[in-house]
Amino acid sequence: MQPKLIHHVGILVANLEEAIERWERITGYTFGPIHRYRSSHYRDSSEQDEHLHDARLSFSREGTPHIELLEATGTGTHGAANLGVHHLAFVDYGDLEAEHERVTGLGLQVDGRDVNDAGELLLFFTDPPSTDHVRLEFVAPRDHPNVMDDGSPMWRDPSTGRFDAWGPDGKDWRGR
C-alpha cells in the first residue's frame, strides 16, 4: 500500500474570524474565503441517524499540509468539547468504501461519516480513542456539499472540475 501524505491539519476553533486573524498573524499564512460543509446526511456520536451538519471553515493557501480552521458546531465530532487540533486529513481515496473497510478491519472505530444523495461515502473520521486520541479524516475525490458562507454555490475550477472557495480571482477571506 502506497501511503498517503497529510493533506491538511484541521483545527477546531470557537470563533472562525478571530482564529483566522490570529493564525495569519502567527504563521504569515493567508486563509481563503469562509465556506461551509453543509450536509443533511452526516452521522456521528451525537446522533446515529442522518442529520444536518453545517460547519464553517477556511483553508490556508499555503501547504501541503494546509491548515483548515473550522468553527465549532453542534455537540458531536465538531462540538466545542473538541476545540484544538481536530484531525489529520488524507484525501483522494478513489475507493473510500474499501479504505473504510480496511481501517475498521484494523480495529479502528469511526465517529463521523457523510454520504452524498446517492449514498456514496464522501468522508469519515476515526474515533480519537482508537487512534491515540488523534482523529483521522479520510476523504473521497467526489463532489462535497460545500457552499460559500452566505449559502451561494462555490466556484468550480474549469480545469479540474473541482469546487474551489478561492474562486477565479484567488481573493482571501477578506476579499483581497
Image: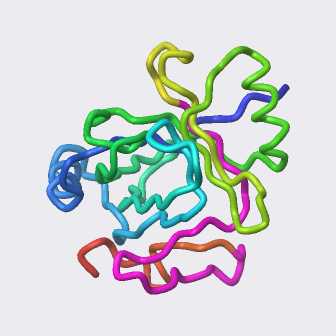
* The one of 72 and 58 positioned closer to us in this rendering: 72
Q: Residue at x 36, y 78 (%)?
A: 171
Give the image location of residue 30, x and y in percent.
Answer: 31, 60
One can see residue 58 in this view:
no
Q: What span is colored magenta in the figure?
A: 136-161
- Assign the N terminus to one quadrant of the image: top right
* The one of 155 and 114 positioned closer to us in this rendering: 114
Residue 39 quadrant? bottom right
- Assign the C terminus to one quadrant of the image: bottom left
Residue 119 quadrant? bottom right
Residue 160: say if magenta. Answer: yes
Does residue 17 lie above or below 72 as drawn?
below
Give the image location of residue 109, x and y in percent.
Answer: 62, 23
Q: Residue at x 55, y 34 (%)?
A: 111
Q: Is residue 111 left or right of residue 15?
A: right
Does residue 75 lie above or below 119 as drawn?
above
Residue 120: say if magenta. Answer: no
Number of dots carrying numbers:
0
Q: Residue at x 48, y 81 (%)?
A: 167
Does residue 60 lie above or below 153 as drawn?
above
State how the image is colored. Answer: rainbow
One can see residue 161 in this view:
yes
Give the image location of residue 47, x and y in percent.
Answer: 49, 44
Q: Is residue 65 left or right of residue 21?
A: right
Q: Is residue 82 left or right of residue 123?
A: left
Q: Is residue 157 left or right of residue 44?
A: right
Does residue 165 lie above or below 119 as drawn?
below
Q: Residue at x 24, y 76 (%)?
A: 174
Give the image location of residue 88, x and y in percent.
Answer: 50, 34
Q: Main secondary structure of the magenta part?
A: loop
